[in-house]
Image (cartoon, rainbow, N blue to C red):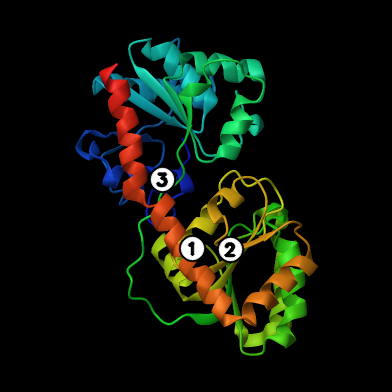
């Protein structure tokens, strides 16, 4: 309902839908329904708004939850186009509402980008079991997400499959790699920002020829705290530190392609970790935590931290900075891993095969 789809502001779900859609054999038969303006979204798109409820001739927008009114509007679009297969991204309550309104003929799938046990309508085993009984398939971005979904569930688990984010490989010709340490992501404690900043303070004098780029914003509740930390870093690194807010996705990808290494030191159980995937695809050596789905992405093509501490990040940065041969080897291994496991065409064909199977049933 709130997912941004316009280029430069698109969220992770919108990027997933666009990338799979562009490479799908069903490209001309896809309809994307969302609650924000289309902008330059590349696929056929319907912007719907939550219906207002009329009582006694008066419109009352707050009579029912906005999410349910949005679901009603989405049902109208789906029904008017005669859709046979519907994929709901990341919203258990929306899935249930569509299931009740659309009836049993429509094939309904749920596409999970996050830990289901932290999401409304999916937190408990009975909730997930009831949803699974109606779902034709549940797609999970990682084995970590799948394991969290099936926790406590008996039966029907063959409907739950792993389908990671895919990515379009970058051109082989790229600018020379720079002595640059990159961080991309929200400035929140869960992303290991504090530990990374501490490590960067310590490593600055030991790497006089290196630079740091930080791309991302802090939410309002953390803004003052991290602006102060960034000011401290700026005082140490000087002009060697660049800080940017949100950037269009192509610009972020160019930053990965320039960076010798990218830090993804998440403290929480990262359900997938698109940042790590993008860095690997660009040949940037990755330092990541061994949490959630990150080890599935990085494998042996990066440095995995057993603990997210300033000492561990500091040691990993120095290791890669002082060993260009290993750094380059990890960069090549990352690109090879992405080509073998996460190339968008490969994963799109897998998704289309499942769609074909469900449509033929």
Residue 325's disc number: none
Q: Can residue 314 be seen in the rendering of this structure? A: yes
Find the residue positioned furthest to the bottom.
208
Q: Secondary structure at mark 3?
A: helix
Name the residue nearer the viewer: 306 or 186. 306
Which quarter shows the C terminus?
top left
- Asked which quadrant contains residue 74, the reply is top left
Q: Can residue 58 be seen in the rendering of this structure? A: no
Vertical order, 262 against 319 (above or below)? above
Q: In terms of sequence position, does the residue under pointer 1 or pointer 3 come before the other? A: 3
Mark 3: few/some/many CA within 10 Å (<14, 14-19, 20+): some
Residue 302's disc number: 2
Q: Secondary structure at mark 1?
A: helix
Residue 334's disc number: 1
Q: Are marks 2 and 1 in contact (CB under 8 Å)?
A: yes
Name the residue nearer the viewer: 24 or 31. 24
Whole-percent x, y for residue 286 in the image: 57, 65
Q: Which residue is mark 3?
A: 16
Which residue is pictured at 37% across the width and 44% down the height?
347
- Asked which quadrant contains residue 126, the reply is top right
Q: Are marks 1 and 3 in contact (CB under 8 Å)?
A: no
Vertical order, 284 against 131 (above or below)? below
Q: In terms of sequence position, does the residue under pointer 3 or pointer 2 come before the other? A: 3
Whole-percent x, y for residue 20 in the image: 34, 44
Name the residue nearer the viewer: 54 or 231. 231
Residue 139 as seen in the image, left or right of residue 292:
left
Residue 42 as seen in the image, left or right of residue 302:
left
Q: Are marks 3 and 2 in contact (CB under 8 Å)?
A: no
Q: Secondary structure at mark 2?
A: strand
Whole-percent x, y for residue 188 in the image: 68, 55
Q: Nearer the viewer, mark 1 or mark 3?
A: 1
Mark 2: few/some/many CA within 10 Å (<14, 14-19, 20+): many
């Amino acid at each position: 309902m709130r997912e941004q789809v316009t280029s430069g502001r698109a969220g992770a779900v919108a990027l997933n839908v666009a990338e799979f859609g562009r490479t799908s054999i069903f490209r001309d038969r896809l309809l994307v329904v969302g609650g924000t303006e289309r902008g330059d979204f590349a696929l056929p798109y319907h912007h719907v708004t939550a219906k207002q409820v009329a009582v006694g001739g008066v419109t009352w927008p707050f009579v029912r939850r906005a999410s349910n009114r949005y679901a009603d509007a989405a049902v109208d679009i789906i029904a008017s186009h005669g859709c046979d297969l519907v994929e709901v991204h990341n919203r258990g309550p929306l899935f249930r509402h569509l299931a009740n309104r659309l009836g049993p003929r429509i094939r309904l799938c749920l596409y999970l980008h996050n830990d289901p046990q932290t999401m409304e309508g999916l937190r408990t085993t009975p909730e997930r079991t009831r949803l699974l009984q109606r779902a034709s398939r549940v797609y999970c971005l990682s084995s970590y997400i799948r394991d969290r979904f099936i926790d406590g569930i008996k039966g029907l688990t063959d409907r739950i499959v792993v389908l990671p984010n895919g990515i379009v490989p970058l051109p082989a010709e790229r600018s020379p790699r720079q002595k640059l340490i990159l961080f991309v992501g929200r400035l929140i404690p869960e992303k290991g920002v504090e530990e990374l900043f501490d490590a960067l303070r310590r490593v600055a004098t030991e790497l006089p020829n290196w630079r740091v780029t930080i791309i991302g914003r802090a939410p309002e509740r953390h803004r003052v705290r991290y602006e102060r930390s960034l000011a401290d870093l700026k005082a140490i690194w000087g002009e060697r530190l660049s800080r940017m807010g949100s950037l269009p996705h192509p610009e972020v990808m160019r930053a990965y392609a320039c960076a010798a290494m990218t830090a993804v030191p998440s403290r929480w159980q990262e359900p997938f970790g698109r940042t790590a995937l993008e860095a690997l695809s660009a040949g940037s050596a990755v330092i990541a935590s061994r949490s959630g789905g990150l080890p599935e992405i990085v494998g042996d093509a990066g440095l995995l931290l057993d603990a997210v501490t300033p000492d561990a990040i500091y040691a990993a940065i120095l290791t890669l900075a002082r060993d260009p041969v290993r750094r380059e080897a990890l960069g090549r291994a990352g690109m090879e891993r992405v080509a073998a496991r996460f190339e968008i065409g490969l994963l799109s064909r897998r998704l289309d095969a499942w769609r074909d199977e469900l449509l033929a049933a």
